[in-house]
Amino acid sequence: MEPSTSLDSAMTTFTGYQRSVVALLAFLQFTVILDFMVISPLGALVMPQLKIVPAQFGLVVSAYAFAAGASGLLAAGFADRFDRKKLLLIFYTGFILGTFLCGIARTYLFLLFARTITGMFSGVLGSTVFAITTDLFPYQMRGRVMGIVQTAFAASSVIGIPVGLYLSNYWGWNAPFLLIVAIGTLVGAAAAHFLRPVDSHLKMHPDRSPLHHFWHTISTPRYLQGIGTTGLLATGGFMLMPYSSAFSVHNLGLSFSQLPMIYTITGLCSIAAGPLIGRASDIYGKFRIFCFGCVATIIMALIYTNLGVTPIGLVIVINCLMFVGVSSRMISSSALTSAIPLPTDRGSYMSISSSVQQISGGIAAVVGGLIVSEAPSGFLEHFDIIGYVLVGTTLITLVMMYFVNQQVQASAPARPSSTVA
């Protein structure tokens, strides 16, 4: 039986190979997420040098996301027909190539092309990483694994973005991309050397065409339930985060120079909390930790979005607590929903799920822009409404995740456990 909340199972220790796999996957995720995140703060340098307007720069950012979403859908039919290690290395090589093109871009159109190429390959990487994690680690250990792998999000903001901005100030806006290429090349070589083939799913794969396999995934009710739940889960953060820096400056009364301190401390808090949250989800139950994360997110989001001028210390505390709530939701939900697909459908399921999250996040960012308006002074109006929308989506996902958890528990006897040597 795969799902279990047994303390003995949850306390199973990692083998040496498992530790190496987790470290490789976390570092690989770090480079992919850093590449996605670093472009936004470079806007102040990119726009004047390439002589483009904010709308054109916005297209550069969105081209990556939409290309990632599209490639995940297109690859879904093929995702379970190959050794996952080979699939990971092929798409990671394409990601490095796209990032290198960003590093040598000198015109707007070339940068737009480069970001599209990068997005096309990175769109499959995240789902492949989670498919490998699910294949190699039993359900009772996935919370801890997800907790470590997902610290890449926090690490990219704490370590990567400040370093990227520092390099861009001295060597130009292309420099951070070339640094990612250098690091990514080493990570890719390490993965090629140390990661063993991940092909156990091929031995049980039904004889389906890619189109049939894609259709099977999107027409299976329990798969749609999980995909819909994780898709909605991404909307709240995408509504809130794009406007948080402007809200901090114009509504909370902080200065631009104080923002790096807020992001750094919040990121460090997330890095420290991630593995603890993952371990707690294995010991006390994924759904229980998800419930805790929902409650914490709702409380802190309501407080945060209704703040006026606030001392920086209090802002940091509120941000840290809110991100603990968000991390609790994301880590526990990733571990819980990993038990939904059968081994033969994991790659397809996770590719589609990742694509839906990308697309729903993009839509949420647009909706957030329609809700928020900016006064002549820069003050953001109706920001509290985003908080109420986030509360609504959080409550809906809580109900949806309850039924996902029920479905996982009900199907447990039919599921083989994942193992890794």
Image (cartoon, rainbow, N blue to C red):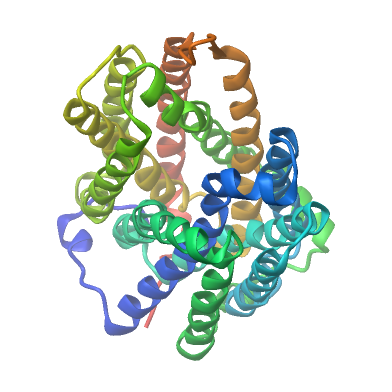
Q: Which of 379 and 28 is in front in this view?
A: 379
| Closer to us: 140 or 371 | 371
**21 vs 59, nearest the viewer:** 59
Front-lying residue, 389 or 280: 389
In this picture, residue 415 sits left or right of residue 105: left
Residue 155 drawn at (x, y percent): 36, 57
- Give percent across and percent down for residue 9: 22, 62
Q: Residue at x 67, y 45 (%)?
A: 48
Picture quarter containing residue 319?
top left
Q: Quadrant of residue 308?
A: top left
Asked whether, in this view, residue 11 is left or right of residue 403, the answer is left
Which quadrant does the N terminus fall into?
Answer: bottom left
Q: Residue at x 53, y 64 (%)?
A: 176
Left or right: where does residue 407 sit relative to residue 373? Answer: left
Residue 116 seen in the current view: yes
Across and down, in percent, residue 330 comes to 40, 43
User: Height in image: 49 above or below 77?
Assistant: above
- Report x, y in % for residue 266: 28, 42
33 lies left or right of 202? left
Q: How many marks?
A: 0
Is residue 1 visible to the viewer in this orientation of the structure?
A: no
Residue at the image position 24 percent from the left and 45 percent from the top: 265
Q: Is 340 located above or below residue 166 in the figure?
A: above
User: Which corner quadrant holds the C terminus?
Assistant: bottom left
Q: In this view, does 361 lie above or below 149?
A: above
> Residue 368 lies in what quarter of the image?
top right
